[in-house]
Amino acid sequence: ASVLRKLIRRLKLAGRVSVLHEDFLSASIPDDRPRIFIGNPPYVRHHALPRSRKSWLGMAGRALGNTFSELAGLHVYFLLRCLMEAKSGDRLVMVLPSEWLETRYGADLKRSLLDRASSIALYVFPPGAQIFEGTMTTSVVLDLGFGGAGVDVSAGLIDPSKKSIVRGPLTMQLPQTAPERANWLHLAWAATGCEHAFDRDLPGTVELGDLFRIHRGQVT
């Protein structure tokens, strides 16, 4: 925060920019004008979060009318805080791990997005692309708009080598029944025509879930 404040003074922006060095989950966020929430939340898995932090999910659930799983990583907490704050005219753009798009615990989060946002755009990367060095997880850029009736859902494809969107945004069709339970990552890959998005599409392959019931355990 001190480095950022020095840079702001050097650029003579002190009267236009305020730097808050606080816990984002409890900080007071001004709402007297339209806002844009931009972030790349820390990737901290639920195993590393203390019980005191996980209890915050209960408060978020009451505010958003859902029950959120304690299997969620810290990045989900940041997104939920923004959903709790967002008003008509606000915007959100965040780089997130994409696991919540396809896991069972992500269903309530997706339901909250459908309830709160007026537009949802998922900018995905090709399967297997490693966006953050040393982090074995797929990623998504989430773009949300707030205000207006209904919700538009779209998807785009990012080429990491070109650092740009190479396809989309294109309409992403969600199921009419229980759309929050669908695998949004697969739907986004399908909407953008991403080749070989699913291993099961390749000859002679099946998904592990077709053979076994899979549960998240202590070491997953």
Image (tube, rainbow, N blue to C red):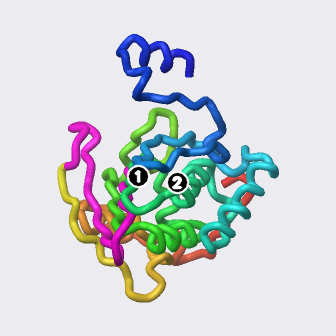
Q: In which quarter of the image is residue 212?
A: bottom right
Residue 99 screen position, x and y as percent: 51, 58
Q: In this view, does 72 lie to the left or right of 137?
A: right
Q: What residue do we see at 79% from left, 46% from top?
A: 50
Q: Name the residue under label 1.
A: 92
Asked whether 143 falls inside the magenta stretch, the response is yes
Q: What residue do we see at 41% from left, 52% from top?
A: 92
Secondary structure beneath disc 1?
strand
- Amino acid beneath label 2: Cys
Q: What is the quadrant of the C terminus in the image?
A: bottom right
- Does residue 211 sit above or below 202 in this rendering? below
Q: In which quarter of the image is residue 16?
A: top left
Circles 2 and 1, Cβ within 8 Å, touching? The answer is: yes
Residue 131 screen position, x and y as percent: 40, 40
Q: Is the magenta stretch mostly helix, strand or loop?
A: strand
| Of the pair 82 and 139, the residue shown nearer to us | 82
Q: Is residue 5 left or right of residue 155?
A: right
N-terminal of the pair, mark 2 or mark 1, is: 2
Q: Mark 2 points at which residue?
A: 82
Which range is magenta?
139-165
